[in-house]
Amino acid sequence: MRQEPFVVPGKLVVPYRYFVGRLASKALIALRDDKKVMGVRCPTCNLTYMPPRSTCGRCFSKLEELVEVGDKGTVLTYTVVYHKEPVHPMEPPFVYGLIKLDGADTALPHFIGEVEPEKVSIGMKVQAVFKDKREGNILDIKYFKPQ
Amino acid sequence: MAERVAVVSVAQTKYHQNRGDVREAELAYEAIEQVLQETGLKFVEDGTGIDATVSCSHDHWDGQTISDIKIGDVAGAHLRPEEKVAEDGTHAVYYAMLQILSGHHDVVLVVSHMKESQTVRSMIENAAFDPVYQRLIGLDFLTAAALQARRYMYKYGITEEQCAKVVVKNRKNAQNNPYAQAPMGLTVEDVLRSPMLSSPIRQLDAKPVSDGACAMILAKEEKAKRLSDKPAWIKGAGSCYDAFYLGDRDLADCQSLMLAAKQAYDMAGIGDPRKEIDLAEVSEYYSYQELLWMEGLGFCDRGEGGKLIDSGVTQMGGRLPLNPSGGLLSGRPFAVGGMAAVAEAVLQLRGEAGARQLPDVSTALAHGVTGPCGQLQCVLVLGKD
């Protein structure tokens, strides 16, 4: 009789409390309370980063200037997810997009909804749909829908 | 460079979808034992053996913090120096090279090991993303790669057929590699018929789950010449990071690879990689990546990766064969992937690549990558002389 290798099952479940950062704290409060999507501007490089961060990776300036980047943007790329993984937040098929918000120079990955997956395209103009009950995280944007 | 560093011995396990019969240390020792036997080296303190060990593995993949803690006994780390590089195996080789160039050590054992089969890939990769803005939406390296593939193919007009040709070529090459996990005779149609995972990436466009280990010995010039009659010299090395947030970069480009390659070529004195490199082993976790990495390495102009695969230049009989071993698409684990690329480069330089041996190899390139969408890149150029 063949003996299977003996396996001990294991699982690491570790709680973390991630401080979101000096500027992202303000940005996530603005998202939760006012449905405002915020980025941060580097005056030296003349670039607006979304997500906001405290230091410019290009010039090392300390960043201070939170600016509203708006809830509308353009799809730079997308994928339709057909397979299942435990990390997926919904049943396939669903769509991820990389969305450049109009007031930002960098893009945000998020879901694209309210559209047939086959109809999503690069260059499509989209708009954020907010959750009714917001908690102060990026999922306060439910998804982006075509404008 | 005052001193030169060579790889004097390499060994790999056969890559397998599930090595349920061994623990990580046992798996690593399968490779380590071979390089000890080939060189006759021992872990001793009198300057005649191995001075130190560098390993490559990942805490989260292994489900154990300090993931190298469990291989100490088989890696010569009992009351001796051992450091872990938790990136790709190429970075472990890079670090060991620096240990020798700095004069700190003469002879270093490098070992990478991974049992992907023990956990769930997507959950590990999801935890690599920023917890505030990216992790919550459930991205993993596959869905991120799909975003990159789409952007790259759109910007440069790369087709699914051209990506599929990479799979066909590499799985075919693997048929001549006894270490390869999953050699297959495939057609472009077979690849295009395989189930869509995350468009445009299909099942056969992605590397399979893999377990395995790779080990090698690096030595400074004087000792390398005594340890091997066929040392493979590390002529050039480069490493470069790109932005953490996916949306900070244009995913159609691979600027960090271009910069890593430039460092390696400058150090190796290579002016035209298209003429001076005889073969390259690149780390293609997904088929489109081989095309994009060819561009980053300067084997063709930007956007010409599709034309290069169409031309047949990168096939076994071509002028610049890519992934003669079969590459990652034929089954190689995360972390071990790029080190296996170095191992193949060394075997080809030594004329020990068996049925897949290429003629007249004097300069070979090995490439490794870590992070979503090729964030961290490493390029090593190895040569016979």
Image: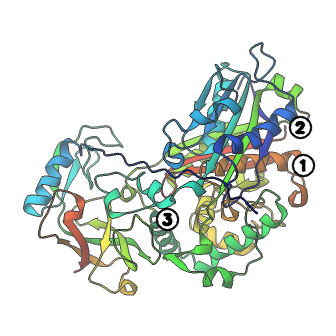
Kind of residue indicated by mark 3? Leu
Residues under labels 2 and 1: Cα distance?
9 Å
Q: Are marks 1 and 3 in contact (CB under 8 Å)?
A: no
Residues under labels 3 and 2: Cα distance?
39 Å
Residue at numbered disc 2:
B230
Nearer to the camera, B384 or B342: B342
Kind of residue indicated by mark 2? Lys
Position of the N terminus of chain B by quadrant: top right
Kind of residue indicated by mark 1? Gly
- Quadrant assignment, res B169: bottom right
Q: Which mark is nearer the camera, 1 or 3? A: 3
Question: Does label 3 lie on the same chain as label 1?
Answer: yes
In primary-sequence order, the first of circles 1 and 3 is: 3
Q: Chain of mark 1?
A: B
Residue B304 seen by the camera: no
Report helix, strand or loop for mark 3: helix
Q: Are marks 3 and 2 in contact (CB under 8 Å)?
A: no
Report helix, strand or loop for mark 1: loop
**Where's residue B146, x and y in %?**
48, 69
- In the rendered structure, the answer to whether residue A139 lies left or right of residue B303 reads left
- In the rendered structure, the answer to whether residue B141 lies left or right of residue B326 reads left
Q: Which mark is residue B351?
A: 1
Q: Residue furthest left?
A: A34
Q: Residue furthest top?
A: B46
Q: Which mark is residue B142?
A: 3
Residue B102 seen by the camera: yes
**Where's residue B257, x and y in %?**
56, 51
